[in-house]
Amino acid sequence: MSSDPATVPAALAAALRANQNAPLITYYDERLGERTELSAVTLDNWVAKTANLLVDGAALGPDDSAAVLLPAHWQTAAVLLGCLTAGVPVRFGATATGPAPVDVAFAAVDRAEQARAARPAETYLLGLAPMALPLREVPDGALDYVVAVRAFGDRFSSAPADPSGIAWYEPEPVSQAALADRARRHAGESGLLPGGRLLVPVDAEPDPVAWLFAPLLLGASVVLVRNADAERLDAIAATERVTTRT
C-alpha cells in the first residue's frame, strides 16, 4: 500500500482497492466441518450492511456505544468492522458492561445473559452457524443478526470514520487512529509481512487486534481455525499457504 491507512476501516478500503477478490478471512471449524472464505469485497458487503443497520436502522453514531460479546469468527469481523465504519465505539468482551448502559449489543447466543447485563436498548444475537444460517429460535427481547442485517444496503455512503473519534473502550477511550497504530505495531512485532497469510488458532479467543486489525493494517490475510489438533493445524497451514503462525 502506498500510504498507511489512518483507521481500520480505511485499511479495509485499501484491501478492496488492492484486490477485491483475494481471500481476506478464511474460517475453519473442524468440529462442524466448516470452511468459509471471505474475499475483501464479500467482507466489505457484510461490514456495510452492519454499518447501515447501526446508522440507518438504529440511528446510532459516535456518541453511542456497542457491546460486542463474540468469539473470533468471520461474523465477528463483520460486526466489529461495521461498528468502526459507522463510528460507533465498541465495548468488547470484559469491557462490555460498565456504569452506563450501551445502546446496542451483539452477542453469541450462549452469551445472551452477559449481553443483558450491558443493558442495551437493542440486542442482536448470533448463532455463528455455517453458511450464516439464522437462529432456529430467537429469545424474547432479541433479534437475529443475520436476518436483520440482510435487510440493509450493500454500500455504506456516510463519511469515513474520523481518525480522532473514539473506536474502542478498554475501559478508557481509544481513538480510531490509536487503534490503527496499535494494530500496525502488533503486525510489525508478529513477523507478518504485507501480502502474508496468518494462521490463528481461535479456541483461546485471541485479541481482535491480533487476528483482525493487525492483518488488515498490514495488507495481509488471516486463517482462523477452531477445534483442530496440532497435526490438522499443520495440514491447514500447508493447504492455505500460511506464512506466519501465532
Image (cartoon, grey):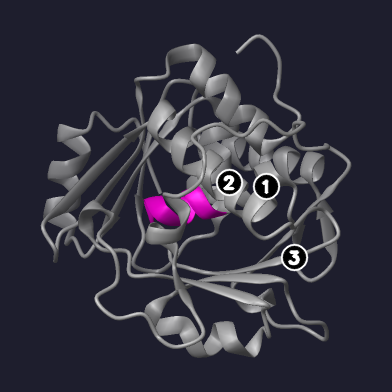
| Residue 105 percent coordinates (x, y) | 60, 72
| Residue 237 percent coordinates (x, y) | 22, 39
Left or right of 199, for residue 157: right
Numbered mark located on residue 84 in the image: 1
> Mark 1 and mark 2 in contact (Cβ < 8 Å)?
yes
| Residue 201 percent coordinates (x, y) | 33, 56
Which residue lies under the disc numbered 2?
A: 81
Residue 108 versus residue 209 in the image, above or below: below
| Residue 165 percent coordinates (x, y) | 86, 46
- Within the image, what quadrant is residue 88 found in? bottom right
Give the residue type that dot 1 points to.
Leu
Which mark sits nearer the N-terminus, 3 or 1? Answer: 3
> Mark 1 and mark 3 in contact (Cβ < 8 Å)?
no
Residue at 79%, 71% in the rendered image: 171
- Within the image, what quadrant is residue 19 found in? top left
Give the residue type that dot 2 points to.
Leu
Which mark sits nearer the N-terminus, 2 or 3? Answer: 3
Under tag 3, what secondary structure?
A: loop
The stretch drawn in magenta includes residue 76:
yes
Residue 231 versus residue 38 in the image, above or below: below
Which residue lies under the disc numbered 3?
A: 65
Residue 185 versus residue 168 in the image, above or below: above
Residue at 57%, 40% in the rendered image: 214
The residue closer to the viewer here, 165 or 241, is 165
How crowded is the residue under tag 1: few (<14 C-alpha within 10 Å), some, or many (20+)? many
Under tag 1, what secondary structure?
A: helix
Give the residue type that dot 3 points to.
Ser
Under tag 2, what secondary structure?
A: helix
